[in-house]
Image (cartoon, rainbow, N blue to C red):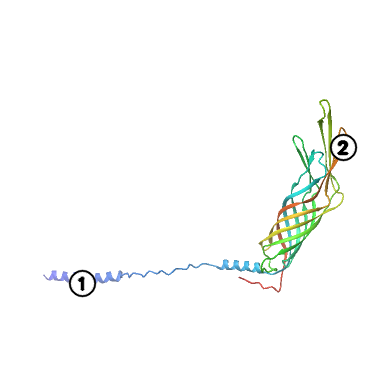
Amino acid sequence: MKTIYTLLVFTFCASVVFAQNEDYYNPVTKPVKESYEPVTPLVNTFKTKREKAIFAKYSTEKIRNRWYIGFDGFIGTDKSTLNNNFDGLVDTKSASRSGYSASIGWVNQEKWGVEVEYARSPIHNTLIINNSYPLEYKMDNDKNNIAFRAKRRILFGKSNALVRRSAFWIGAGAGIVPNSGKQKDFMEFEGYLRRTRFTNDTLYLSSDTRTNSKITGFADATAEYVIRVAKAFDLSFYARKRWGLGNSLSTQLDYYVNKVQTQTAMIKADGSGLAFGISLRYMLHIGYDDGGKHELE
């Protein structure tokens, strides 16, 4: 009996100790209150702010003057004139042309500019001989052109004239076409024309093309939109109208029937026409206005 009593006491004590240990190592977990406040991630905005500051600085810097060099590519047309078509035997038409050029320019206070350009661009004469299968021949001059232009920026609204930004420009200029006076092409054509059943006429046509022995000139007008693509580069898209001052290229036509010269004609070209081009310009020097304020946005 004593043994049973001792075992019960031992069991009760062990149960109490075990319960206390279980509460110690397994605390009651309290529910956590849910939070609906938005979490703002930490983002490094240093680079973005710096880029904005640099862009704002360059876009508001006041420029006193600048020098640039440009490289152009363009396409267009130029026309030639014919004073006699030999009763429809010969004809002429406008010719398409392409060219390239290099220029150097100076801009003052983002208002006015001057530019000197050397271009490799041909002036054409086109001869068309009409028969069952029309023949077309295109002759060109020495391709040298030198131009001087003045330009004016067109301002809209309250734009600051001293700030270099994308804008429209208009310009007018004049130039010279150095000519060598050399013969460019000489061609001969022969044919027959039936008069009666038993007789034919022998036809002969000669074409002698030469450049002028003197310097000729031209005038032009330009409209362009200049885009600032970087601190040191501009890109220009332009249209240009040109008026020739003197014939740079002439083609003498002589027409013979049965070895007797019956008619003459002349095709002349002075370079008048229209061109469309694109120009990439690199800033050689930029002079900033010392009195201007550099504002950062």
The residue furthest right is 260
Query: Which residue sits at x=21%, y=72%?
Result: 13
Q: Position of residue 42 (x, y in %)?
A: 49, 68
Q: Is residue 167 left or right of residue 3?
A: right
> Which of 115/23 is in front?
115
Percent position of residue 146, x then y: 80, 55
Measured Cα–Cα span from mark 1 to mark 2? 146 Å
* Viewer-closest of 41 and 175: 175
The residue labelled by disc 2 is 262
Q: Which mark is residue 208?
A: none
Amino acid marked by disc 1 = Cys
Position above or below: 290 against 172: below
Near mark 1 (Cα within 10 A), the count class, few <14, some 14-19 or many ≥20, is few
The tag earlier along the polypeptide, 1 or 2, is 1
Position of residue 274 in the picture relative to residue 253 (left or right) = left
Left or right, residue 35 beside residue 109: left
Q: Quadrant of the C terminus?
A: bottom right
* Amino acid bearing label 2: Thr
Q: Can you give x and y, in whole percent of width and height, for residue 59 in the image?
A: 65, 67
| SS category of the residue bearing label 2 | strand
- Which residue is rendered at x = 86% and y = 36% of the image? 256
Q: Which residue is mark 1?
A: 13
